[in-house]
Amino acid sequence: MLPSDRAQAARKSPAGAKIALIIDIYDWHARELAAAFARAGAALVPVRLAQCGFDTARPSGIVIPGFGASLPDAVFVRAVGSGTFESVTLRLDVLHSLGTLKIPVLNSARTIELCVDKAATSFALARNHIPTPQTWTVQSWGAACRIVRRECAHGPLVLKPLFGAQGFGLKLIRREADLPPLHSTDGVYYLQRYVAAGGDRFRDLRLFVLAGKVIAAMTRHAGQWITNMKLGALPERLEPDLQMIELALRAVDAVSAAFAGVDLIRDDSGRLQVLEVNSMPGWRGLQKVTPFSIADMLARGVLARLGPGQARAAG
């Protein structure tokens, strides 16, 4: 019998589940999730992927601190952590391998790869005919200059880090002189058509999707064009309409996410477009305008993946 088969045979109830929470730091989100899983009768073990690895002498072949010779019943990924190309590859290998052993990993390594790489996200959205701002990704300053000369005649572009979050590193490009040198962009220019939110107000929408449903939503209002909560945006509770919901669900399906934060914006013509799909979304700002615990919903969503009688026995 394979190790994964033995583990499946030794399972007990989801209320006794032991869940690995993949984090970089033990922050507000980790504390909220720990309390939520405890309320659901499950244990949450914080784990850094930097401490995980492989040992082919073990039955599973995978080393997860806090689980001894066993493996988690499920894995909830809050952060992969920064590192070298090799170290990040190894961390994703661990997540891929857990999935191979039929351990529920939320979100999967493939979904995380698609979402942290903005070029891959843009490609997935466009390929699925989901409205999203036109995007160009190139690897030379000359190629970026040609795009800027051609496209900025029709309006500004946004330069974004290929791997980035929380609104940091964004730059509005109106002319060639606005382009930073190639070395400061890690060798890649990711350029996207700037979408004005209509009038002189800066706002966009965040819809939180879990298990095929929008469970919470907000409008983010800001005093500048970058509408991220970390940079001072203010949340307002949103009751999304059917068009918003349908677009968010399509975007999540395009990257095969179990849960995600989907950012939408309505342009001057009133058309909704998808700006981003975040596979490791924060929800602290969203929680301020949501009347129930988002962490409780996430914990229930993870445990529902186990089903009745499917928590892994220790040992």
Image (cartoon, rainbow, N blue to C red):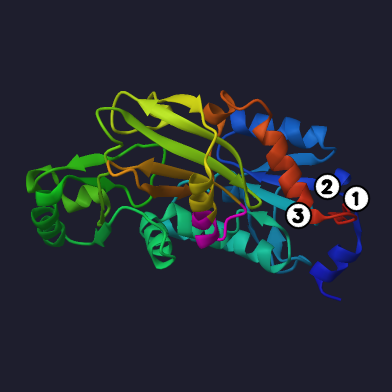
Quadrant housing the N terminus:
bottom right
The local crowd at label 2, few if under 14, some if 14 to 19, many if 20 or more residues have their Cα within 10 Å, is many
Q: Nearest the camera: 66 or 293?
A: 293
- The segment highlighted magenta reads 250-258
Above or below, 286 against 22 in this view is: above
| Residue 87, visible in the rendered structure | no
Left-right relation of 290 to 103: left
| Residue 109, visible in the rendered structure | yes
The local crowd at label 1, few if under 14, some if 14 to 19, many if 20 or more residues have their Cα within 10 Å, is some
Marked residue nearer the N-terminal end (3 or 1): 1
Q: Nearest the camera: 115 or 153?
A: 153
Q: Distance from label 2 to label 3 (Cα)?
A: 11 Å
Residue on which disc 2 sits: 17
Residue on which disc 1 sits: 13
Residue type of the residue flagged with mark 1: Ser
Residue on which disc 3 sits: 305
Q: Distance from label 2 to label 1 (Cα)?
A: 7 Å
| Percent coordinates x, y for residue 210 in the rendering | 63, 47
* In contact (CB < 8 Å): disc 2 and disc 1: yes
- At numbered mark 1, what does the secondary structure look like: helix, strand or loop? loop
